[in-house]
C-alpha cells in the first residue's frame, strides 16, 4: 500500500524558516517524481514544487522561487521542502504527492498534509 | 504561466441531478488535464486524468471531456457522497496550475 506521511508543520514567525518532510512507503520511491502542493485555509489548491526522480530537475511556483528548496533522499525514501523567509501568505496545509510523469502526468497518491502557520 | 479558470465556483444540486463543471486553460494544453475531488479536511483524490480517462476505482458517473483549452467534468446522477469541491489541474508544462475549484453543494 502506497503511503505518504508529511511532518514538520509548525507555527513560525514571518521571516523564519521551516523544513517539511514526507516519508514514502509502499512503492519504489526512486521511480517517481514527487510534488508539494499547498492549500491556504478555506482556499484552493496551489502547486508549489516538483522534483524529478533523481533530483536532477526541480520546478517551483514563482511565489516561492529563491525561498523554498525541494529535495529528496532516495535511499531514505524521503522528500523535503526547505522553506526560508516565510511570509504570512505561506500559511497553508502542505501536501506531498507522488507524481507519475510518464506516461500519464498525474498525482495519484497524496499524504494527509501538515499545517504551516506563519504569524507573529 | 498557464492559468486555469474554473466555473462555476459553486453549484447547488440535488441527488440524481447532472452537474457540469468547466475548466478553461489560458493556453493550449493538449489533453494534459486532471480532475480532483476534495472533501473537507481530506486530501484531494484523483478522479480523471488525460482529460477523459477515469482513474481506477472511480464510479463511471464521472466523465471528463475536452482538449486544447476547454474541458468539462460531468457528474451524472449525483450521489450523496459526491458533495465536495472539485479542482482541475493542467500538466502541460510547469507550473502545473490548479483551477480555483467548484464546490458542489446540496440544494
Image (spheres, coloured by chain):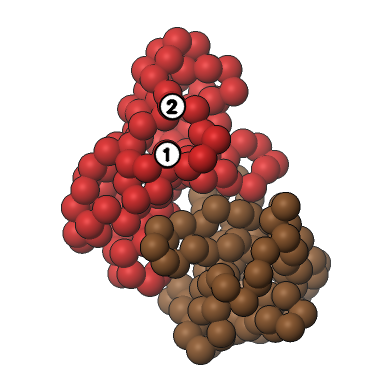
Chain colours: A brown, B red
Q: Name the quadrant of the N terminus of chain B.
A: bottom left
Residue A32 found in image quarter: bottom right
Q: A19 or A58: nearer the eye?
A: A58
Q: B75 or B14: nearer the eye?
A: B75
Residue at horizontal 49%, vertical 28%?
A: B59
- How packed mark 1 is, by other alpha carbons closer than 10 Å (few <14, some 14-19, many 20 or more), is many
Q: Could you say where residue B56 lies in the image, as x and y percent from the top left?
A: 51, 40
Q: State yes or no: discs 1 and 2 in contact (Cβ < 8 Å).
A: yes
In what element is the residue under mark 1?
strand
In what element is the residue under mark 2?
loop
Q: Earlier in the sequence, mark 1 or mark 2?
A: 1
**Chain bearing mark 2:** B
Q: CA distance from mark 1 to mark 2?
A: 8 Å
**Chain bearing mark 1:** B
Residue A30 found in image quarter: bottom right
- Residue B34 in sight: yes
Left or right, A3 with respect to B6, comes to: right
* Residue A20 vertical position relative to residue B25 in the rendered view, above or below: below
Which dot marks residue B60? 2
- How packed mark 2 is, by other alpha carbons closer than 10 Å (few <14, some 14-19, many 20 or more), is few
Residue at horizontal 34%, vertical 50%?
A: B50
Which residue carries the number 1 mark? B54
- Residue A15 in sight: no
Residue A8 found in image quarter: bottom right
Left or right, A45 with respect to A109, comes to: left
* Residue A93 vertical position relative to residue B39 in the rendered view, above or below: below
Residue at horizontal 38%, vertical 71%?
A: B94
Q: A3 or B25: nearer the eye?
A: A3
Q: Are marks 1 and 2 on the same chain?
A: yes
Q: Could you say where residue A75 lies in the image, as x and y percent from the top left?
A: 74, 83
Amino acid at each position: 500500500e502506497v503511503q505518504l506521511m508529511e511532518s514538520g508543520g509548525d507555527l513560525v514567525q514571518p521571516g523564519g524558516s521551516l523544513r517539511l518532510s514526507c516519508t514514502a512507503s509502499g512503492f519504489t520511491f526512486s521511480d517517481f517524481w514527487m510534488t508539494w502542493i499547498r492549500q491556504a485555509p478555506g482556499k484552493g489548491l496551489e502547486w508549489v514544487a516538483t522534483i524529478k526522480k533523481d533530483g536532477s530537475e526541480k520546478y517551483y511556483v514563482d511565489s516561492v522561487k529563491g525561498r523554498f528548496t525541494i529535495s529528496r533522499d532516495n535511499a531514505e525514501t524521503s522528500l523535503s521542502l526547505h522553506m526560508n523567509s516565510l511570509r504570512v501568505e505561506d500559511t497553508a496545509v502542505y501536501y506531498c504527492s507522488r507524481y507519475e510523469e510518464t506516461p500519464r502526468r498525474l498525482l495519484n497518491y497524496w499524504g494527509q498534509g501538515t499545517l504551516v502557520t506563519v504569524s507573529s | 504561466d498557464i492559468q486555469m479558470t474554473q466555473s462555476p465556483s459553486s453549484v447547488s444540486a440535488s441527488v440524481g441531478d447532472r452537474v457540469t463543471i468547466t475548466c478553461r486553460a489560458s493556453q493550449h494544453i493538449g489533453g494534459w488535464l486532471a480532475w480532483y475531488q476534495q472533501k473537507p479536511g481530506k486530501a484531494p483524490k484523483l478522479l480523471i486524468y488525460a482529460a477523459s480517462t477515469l482513474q481506477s476505482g472511480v464510479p463511471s458517473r464521472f466523465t471528463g471531456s475536452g482538449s486544447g483549452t476547454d474541458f468539462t467534468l460531468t457528474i451524472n446522477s449525483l450521489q450523496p457522497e459526491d458533495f465536495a469541491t472539485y479542482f482541475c489541474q493542467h500538466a502541460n508544462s510547469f507550473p502545473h496550475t490548479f483551477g480555483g475549484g467548484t464546490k458542489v453543494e446540496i440544494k
